[in-house]
Image (cartoon, rainbow, N blue to C red):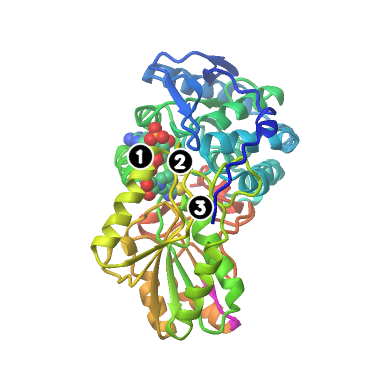
Amino acid sequence: MAFEYAPAPESRAIVDLKSSYGLFIDGEFVDGTGTPFKSISPASEEVLAEVSEASEADVTKAVQAARRAFEKVWGPMPGRERAKYLYRIARIIAERSRELAVLESLDNGKPIKESRDVDIPLVSQWFFYYAGWADKLGYAGRGPDPQPLGVAGQVIPWNFPLMMLAWKIAPALAAGNTVVLKPAETTPLTALLFAEICQQADLPPGVVNIVTGAGATGQALVEHPDVDKVAFTGSTAVGRQIARSVAGTDKKLTLELGGKAANIVFADAPLDQAVEGIVGGIFFNQGHVCCAGSRLLVQESVYDEVLERLKRRMGTLRLGDPLDKNTDIGAINSAEQLARIRELSDVGDAEGAERWSAPCEIPDHGFWFAPTIFTGVTQAHRIAREEIFGPVLSVLTFRTPAEAVEKANNTPYGLSAGVWTEKGSRILSMAEQLRAGVVWANTFNKFDPTSPFGGYKESGYGREGGRHGLASYLKEHA
Ligand code: TAP
């Protein structure tokens, strides 16, 4: 399929991109004292802006501002007053949704139809949902008079920059905590636009602070002695490091880490619908999704048919400019991530799996990887065990439901799973046996602020979303 480059300058014009961005501390933008870094467009490699790096001293200033705001303003404020600010933020996000969607797609590389129709609407919904909780915390499961923890240090990844920010900030503020958040180094821009929205909403200074930088900034934040709660989403390796650094302190910790989800298709499933679910499960957001359906388990009797339909469908996916509304597959977020996807895919070849990529033209600039499937994959293959975090699907087969459960659970991770079948009783029995925090039935990658989300095993602990997401920002009663 020919790739047509269709730049969309008119949509880009709605973003007021600055040439440089500071940190957001105590309600103001200030220059960081670290070494500034550049945020680039992964689709074109052009520099979008220069961004301040927060040094350890800057992180301390942000934590101090958050502490003051917690003690003097936000902690003592009645829940119904906090709710007003959260509703205001939610409304402004909805009003400025186009601008946020364009900036997200520019900085992250994801297709505009995803940022416009999925990410940003969910960001606004998250704030609306938790605004509603702010004066009802007595029902959040932490006793009649629930108390906030204090200052939350939050570190988020680059795959859903604003959505991860909303998952972290909305429940923390609703529960009466103040926050210091570090976005990922490759996607800092929408968090800084969110900081502008906090100003626009007249949020009291210090309630939300944004410190940009690389891993060292994140480390300074999570190790800061005056942080009461650490919330992290990202790789299992960094999650382990953070768990070690928090051990022995009285900081509370939630970790949302990697995944290697099984998407299980039974012979009785509506196959066209299942193929859509397979495609959405692994190619949504270029596969940069912790709960991506990266292992397809197909019942043997329909294997040939599913593969044929899947390849046909993959042939219609359009890869290209993230700002083009017709784009299905955007850019890989960074050169490093592209190198990792290539490396693991080469391992798949070397280990004897068979690679098939959708025919598409790859642009000259930027970071791209064609939607790819590997067949002939065994459970021992690294591409069946390790998180690739890219548009790469490993296909395995099974004969019986018991074999499907065994293979699906044969992973160090336990974040999500999908089941495709017409049989309701099978859905229930599979959901009981699958060791995954979320099990989708006849759908995949569906998110809702009312539903708790989180993993088992090496996928982390704690839940985000719903009432459960609030509990992790409130003190337990003795
Ligand atoms: P991580 O390094 O885990 O990045 C997540 C966040 O943690 C980023 O903000 C990162 O800053 C920060 N960070 C890095 N080192 C830190 C430290 N020692 N202390 C505190 N914070 C630290 O993930 P990555 O390097 O972007 O991606 C690597 C792999 O992780 C991917 O290939 C993928 O498999 C997996 N991953 C999983 C998820 C989810 S949602 N499960 C998300 C992203 C990546 P920088 O941005 O500066 O690195």
Mark 1: give few (<14), some (14-19) or many (20+) Cα within 10 Å.
few
The quarter of the picture where the N terminus appears is bottom right
Quadrant in which residue 269 is drawn: bottom right
**Secondary structure at numbered mark 2:** loop
From the image, tell me which residue sits under label 2: 333
Pinpoint residue 171: horizontal percent, then vertical percent.
59, 42
Mark 3: give few (<14), some (14-19) or many (20+) Cα within 10 Å.
many
Residue 468 to residue 475: above or below:
below
Residue lying at 58% horizontally and 77% vertically, measured from the top left: 271
Residue lying at the far left of the rendered structure:
350
Which numbered mark, 3 or 2, is in the foreground of this view?
2
Pinpoint residue 246: horizontal percent, then vertical percent.
34, 38
- Residue 114 shown left or right of residue 33 in the figure: right
User: What amino acid does circle 2 point to?
Assistant: Asn
From the image, tell me which residue sits under label 1: 336
From the image, tell me which residue sits under label 3: 463
Gap in Å between the C-alphas at discs 1 and 2?
8 Å
Classify mark 1 as within 8 Å of ligand 1 or not, answering yes or no.
Answer: yes
Q: Nearer the viewer, residue 175 or 48?
A: 48
Ligand 1 positioned in quadrant: top left
Mark 2: give few (<14), some (14-19) or many (20+) Cα within 10 Å.
many
Verify whether residue 432 appears in magenta: no
Residue stretch rendered in magenta on the structure: 419-424
- Residue 344 shown left or right of residue 128 in the figure: left
